[in-house]
Image (spheres, helix red, strand yellow):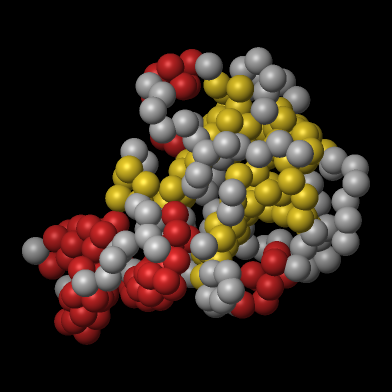
Amino acid sequence: MAMNIPPDVYFQSFWPEMTIDSAITLGRLLPWQPLCDTHLLTVGPKDEDHDRYHLRTCGSSFDGGDELRFDTENLLLVGMVLTIPDKASSDPSVASRWLSAPLIEGLPRLGKFIGFNLDPMDVRHVVPGEPDRLICVNEGIAETASRFRLSVANDVEMFFADGGYCGWGLTNPARHLSCNAQHPNSISLDMEKAVACLLFEYFAVVEYDNIERLNDRDHALHKSLMDLLGRTRTCQGAGALSARIEDILDRFYD
């Protein structure tokens, strides 16, 4: 299904509570590679001073929710820092509906210079396959909503329903796994699938519904995490995942 006319879109700010009007500029992509760990997706300039970056951009800031930054001159999207939700969705049909939505390439452009605050998404979906996908969306989107996906960077899409921004997707998440945003974690293609399996297993264990069990120092979860840690330590390209599991173990079981 082709979409030839850039649709008007909007972002919903929770503070101040308002709708942020935007439009799509077709054929533009962010030039940076996505970088992710188990709780954040980052796309943007990696060597630029943080304060200087925020002075030349506007939009939402990470300290108030998810971050979308737009150039103050042309108002085009220039970078993002998005939270991977702790809560997993139990409805696989949600992911399939998004993956079947039309896809266009372009960048959102704000209607005016403005600052706002953007809530993170509600739930995450992991979709193993060829390719693997991580999908993070808001709950409660009507099945009948008019949906489309906007490709904004390599392997990164933003999701819109009835014009409203309500999710995002990352293709090949293991390929973009990183210990931190300054040092991308490169892995060979033949190891990527093994890392993806470990990453998805981590998401199944460290999940919102298990937080209480972690707080109670649950023995079965501890055993699962230790087993997973052992396998990540021997898997090339899974260093970022090992570091995160060690953090979890130190936090809940030390």
Residue, far left: 254
Quarter location, residue 210: bottom left
Q: Is residue 78 above or below residue 141?
A: above
Q: Quadrant of residue 108?
A: top right
Residue 242 figure quarter: bottom left
For image coordinates 68% across by 73% down, the residue present is 96
Residue 6 vertical placement versus 189 (above, below): above
Between 128 and 54, the one lying in front of the other is 128
* Residue 218 in view (yes/no): no
Residue drawn 14% across the image and 60% down it: 250
Q: Is residue 47 left or right of residue 61?
A: left
Provide residue 135's location: percent of width, then percent of height: 57, 62
**Is residue 223 in view?**
yes
**Residue 49 image point, x, y percent:** 38, 21
Residue 202 placement, left or right of 253: right
Q: Nearer the viewer, residue 33 or 76?
A: 33
Tell me which residue sits at (38%, 70%) in the image.
191
Residue at 61%, 22% in the rendered image: 71
Q: Position of residue 176 (x, y in %)?
A: 44, 54
Judge left or right: residue 123 versus residue 247. Answer: right
* For residue 5, side relative to residue 127 (left or right): right
Choose between 225 and 239: the one closer to the eye: 239
Which quarter shows the N terminus? bottom right
Query: Quarter of the image containing the C terminus?
Result: bottom left
Residue 48: percent from left, percent from top? 41, 24
